[in-house]
Amino acid sequence: MVKISDFQIKDVVNVADGKRLGNVGDIEINLNTGKIEAVVVTGVGKVLGFFGREEDIVIPWKNILKIGEDVILVRFKDMAERVYEEEL
């Protein structure tokens, strides 16, 4: 068994580029099946929390590759990368 609070302290790292995306802020659960559909990585504040914050990142459960003791490895492509690939 894993608690949501256990997820929230783990760093989320994108294996596509090795960047740290942040920490899990929330999860999306399908109430009909009881399964986790996605994790939501909370957007970090810009310039020490001033001037708003970045958008939350929703990562579908199928894109989670490995959940370790300290880190969650995911495969994530942001919208800029997706648009570029579609143009090719």
Image (spheres, helix red, strand yellow):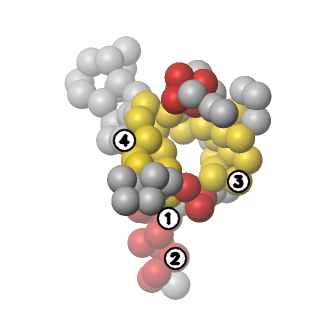
Q: Left or right? Give the position of 64 relative to 33.
A: right
For this rendering, which residue is in front, 15 or 64? Answer: 64
- Name the residue tied to disc 3: 65
Q: Is residue 80 left or right of residue 23?
A: left
Q: Please give the residue where the numbered disc 4 appears in the rendered image.
A: 56
Residue that badge 2 annotates: 85
Of helix, strand and loop, which one carries label 3? strand
Percent from the top left, x then y, of residue 76?
A: 56, 56
Q: Amino acid at mark 2?
A: Glu
Q: Is residue 57 visible?
A: no
Q: Tell me if residue 85 comes above or below residue 16 in the rendering.
A: below
Determine the secondary structure under disc 4: loop
Lower position in the chain sequence, tag 3 or tag 4:
4
User: Is disc 4 in contact with disc 2, using a CB cutoff of under 8 Å?
Assistant: no
Secondary structure under the numbered disc 1 in the rendered image: helix
Name the residue at 34% across, 36% down.
54
Q: Measure the C-alpha gap from mark 1 to mark 3.
A: 20 Å
Q: Residues within 10 Å of mark 1 (few under 14, many from 20)?
A: few
Q: Circles 3 and 4: CB distance less than 8 Å?
A: no
- Identity of the residue furthest to the left in this view: 51
